[in-house]
Image (cartoon, rainbow, N blue to C red):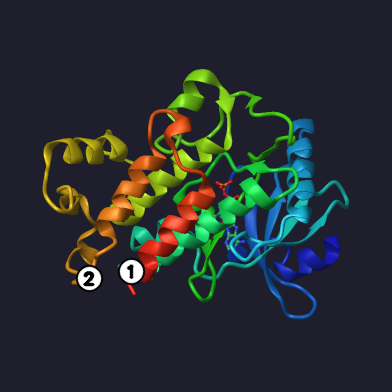
Amino acid sequence: SYDELKKSTGSFSQANQIGSGGYGKVYRGTITGGQVVAIKRAQKTSMQGGLEFKTEIELLSRVHHKNLVGLVGFCFEQGEQMLVYEFMSNGTLRDSLSGKSGIYLDWKRRLRIALGSARGLAYLHELANPPIIHRDIKSTNILLDDNLTAKVADFGLSKLISDTEEHVSTQVKGTMGYLDPEYYMTQQLTDKSDVYSFGVLMLELVTAKPPITKGKYIVREVRMKMDKSNEEDYGVRELMDPSIKNMAYLTGFKMFIQLAMQCVEDSGSDRPSMSDVVKALETILINDG
Ligand code: ADP
């Protein structure tokens, strides 16, 4: 209930605020039974916001997977709109990669995060009914729980697509640097747009930098390196996050880069599906022991 959520967050106090995003502010709270939760509280709601909120609830109530941030409940009382999620104690992947959260992610951990996120996305694309395109895959939408398990968050931009429709035409939404250029040009959304964003995310796991750094796009940087270099690692090691650079084993590194670059192919039809990506990452993880 509203009163319980209000109490659990100290009346939505500044001290309990953990972030803010598209919907409004996000608070940490503890609900009856002791479960720690993240409460997304919508800004005073417009019609548009209300619709978006309802869409998110409908989606999330149908979707359950280990690698998706679970919806614990929601509240639609006293003019308030709130979503209650399981609390992800280790914050966003971006905060870890930037060193902000003080969590060190070694290469193997990064592989596991890639695999977990890929499984969550593959589930949305292939097992959710109807299929769901996330539309905003990025490192701030990958959250880490106590065990550093990666979970995909924020379905606010998701759109349901029906079984029969190949794609849906919509207004382009997404985040610069992660946005599929083909989708941007054609405005035809398919699951391959998420695959593109996921490829960018994979490169981000390697470099630890956001996809556009000092005006340069990571996808283009890596492509240039690969065109020029015939070295074993494509010369991509130069772009690598210094804190993982000196890892002795990195047998799957080349495969990882190849996979990422397949995901960011210009044409969606040349990109793998998310379940292909899951299989490839599983192989890499086994090889890297
Ligand atoms: P955006 O709309 O910009 O994607 P969100 O509204 O999803 O942002 O979340 C804003 C911030 O709140 C996130 O960057 C994250 O730090 C925090 N947050 C969101 N959901 C959770 C959660 N389930 N557990 C812990 N922190 C969360």
Q: Are marks 2 and 1 in contact (CB under 8 Å)?
A: no
Residue 249 on image: x %, y %: 22, 70
**Image location (x, y in percent) of residue 55:** 76, 41
Residue at point 19% right, 35% down? 224
Please say whether residue 83 is visible from this viewpoint: yes
Q: Which residue corresponds to the image point at 47% horizontal and 19% vertical from the top-left?
A: 185
**Pointer 2 or 1: first along the chain:** 2
Can you see residue 110? no
Q: Which residue is mark 1?
A: 287
CA distance for labels 2 and 1: 10 Å
Q: Residue at x 62, y 59 (%)?
A: 68
Position of residue 118 in the picture relative to residue 123 (left or right): left
Q: Residue 11 lies in what quarter of the image?
A: bottom right
For the C terminus, the quadrant is bottom left
- Judged from this view, the residue extending furthest toward the top is 186
Q: Is mark 2 within 8 Å of ligand 1?
A: no
> Where does ligand 1 appear, by image quarter?
bottom right
Amino acid type indicated by mark 1: Asn
Q: In x, y percent, where is residue 147?
A: 51, 76
Residue 171 occupies quadrant = top right
Secondary structure found at label 1: helix
The front one of 1 and 107 is 107
Residue 249 is marked as 2
Quarter of image, res 50 = top right
| Up-down relation of residue 33 to residue 230 (above or below) | below
- Residue 83 in the image: x percent, y percent? 74, 55
Q: Secondary structure at mark 2?
A: loop
Amino acid type shown at disc 2: Tyr
